[in-house]
Image (cartoon, helix red, strand yellow):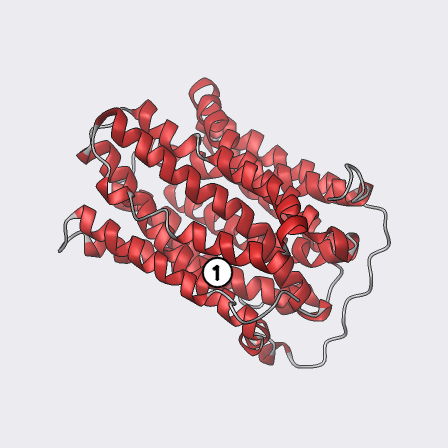
Amino acid sequence: MLRPGALGRDFELLWLAYSTSAVGTALAAGALPLIAITVLDVSTLQVSLLATLSGLAGAVIALPFGGLIEHRRKRPVMIFTDLVRFAAAASIPVAALLGGLTYLQLCLVAFVTTSATIAFTAASGAHLKALVPAGGLTEANSRIESAFWFSNTLGTPIGGGLISLLGATTTMALDAISYLLSAFGVSRIRRPEPPPPIRTVKPSKDLVTGWRQIFAHRGLNALFWNSQLFGGSVMLVSPLLAVLMLRDLHFAPWQYGLVLGAPCLGGILGARSTPWLTNRYGAHRVLLVSGVARAIWLLPMPFAGPGTTGMVLLITTQFGLLISAGIFNPSFATYRLNAVEDGYLSRVTTSWSISSRTTQPLAIAAGGLLTTVLPLPTTLLLAALTCLLSALLLPWHTPTP
């Protein structure tokens, strides 16, 4: 494991940018639905559509981003997308102050933020490889994964407190500032950025290059389908779990928050342990074992009952899921960075993000439809079995690059 600081000042600035933007994303995720409900008094359907349609639309618009980002320097792209997200978030308190806030604007903000986040992720993922030596990629991805779970552990509760104290629209102003801090962090990176690859095909023919690279690599192809099946299953369960806890099991709001918030510490613990586990057991073994482990934890959830026993069961299963995912995600991210040639990283990352952001809302919709014909526990059990199947799609016979 690398000693603290061994990754260098420039990586620390990139990590600062990622961390602050991740906190901003967590704040926005909590604030936008609350604004829709408490300020605009929209229907339940409109609240659902706010996330689903904006996510799908953002993924579609992001289709050409991979090729555009690939052939440009990454830092200006990251700064630009941060400024776009700043302007989108800041427009909400401004519109509210002027009395002109509308549901359409919320949808546009969610759509713009989703698109810009896909672009930021593609640029930052590709740039990471230029800032960190090959031997430090697992440690770097571990740090980034920890920031993700830290923002989800504290960002949402802190966001809820800020919304209660200051109001949802003021919280969005603080959210906007987080993107400015991210842009500042990127602007302070001093290491010369390597020149981008020269475009060799027309932009119209570049749209599917990322998927071609994924499907041409045996290990990446396996991991791609594994991630779509796993992510779709988990997202299908997410809203149904809320219904199970709040309606069927009659959990109090604080119990619901505890079940969702406390297990995120498992994500941090898993992410920080990944470099040690990799050094001890090897990257490929850690990838496979954590990939199997994260697939089993949905199985007990349909059998949760009311009261303390049910709450402890759900916290335990969520903790097991997130600590396994916390280990798997940095291992996977490092595998993908090593498997993909530098000139294709942005396109592969963008294609992957678009696929996930399309699959997951569709899985949520499928879960809702299933509950109209099946009991809720049965739907949860089907999702758990589907998630378990994802373990079969791991790269069992493809060693780590």
Q: Position of residue 26 (x, y in %)?
A: 50, 37
Residue type of the residue flagged with mark 1: Ala
- Please determine whether, in this image, residue 396 is positioned above or below residue 56: below
- Please determine whether, in this image, residue 146 is positioned above or below residue 71: above
Quadrant where the C terminus sits is: bottom right
Q: Residue at x 81, y 42 (%)?
A: 6
Q: Nearer the viewer, residue 36 or 147?
A: 147
Q: In the shown orientation, is residue 232 left or right of residue 198?
A: left
Q: Residue at x 20, y 30 (%)?
A: 306
Q: Which residue is mark 1?
A: 59
Q: Residue at x 56, y 70 (%)?
A: 219
Q: Residue at x 44, y 50 (%)?
A: 294
The image quadrant of residue 9 is top right
The image quadrant of residue 273 is top right
Q: How many marks?
A: 1
- Kindly tell me whether residue 174 is visible in this rendering: yes
Q: Position of residue 213 (x, y in %)?
A: 59, 75
The image quadrant of residue 5 is top right
- Please determine whether, in this image, residue 55 is positioned above or below residue 156: below
Q: Position of residue 202 (x, y in %)?
A: 65, 81
Q: In the shown orientation, is residue 109 left or right of residue 75?
A: left
Q: Nearer the viewer, residue 208 or 154?
A: 154
> Is disc 1 surrounded by few (<14), some (14 to 19) or many (20+) residues within 10 Å?
many
Residue extending furthest top? 165
- Please determine whether, in this image, residue 60 is positioned above or below residue 172: below
Q: In the shown orientation, is residue 19 left or right of residue 93?
A: right
Q: Position of residue 258 (x, y in %)?
A: 38, 27
Q: Secondary structure at mark 1?
A: helix
Residue extending furthest front? 280
Quadrant where the N terminus sits is: top right
- Kindly tell me whether residue 93 is visible in this rendering: no
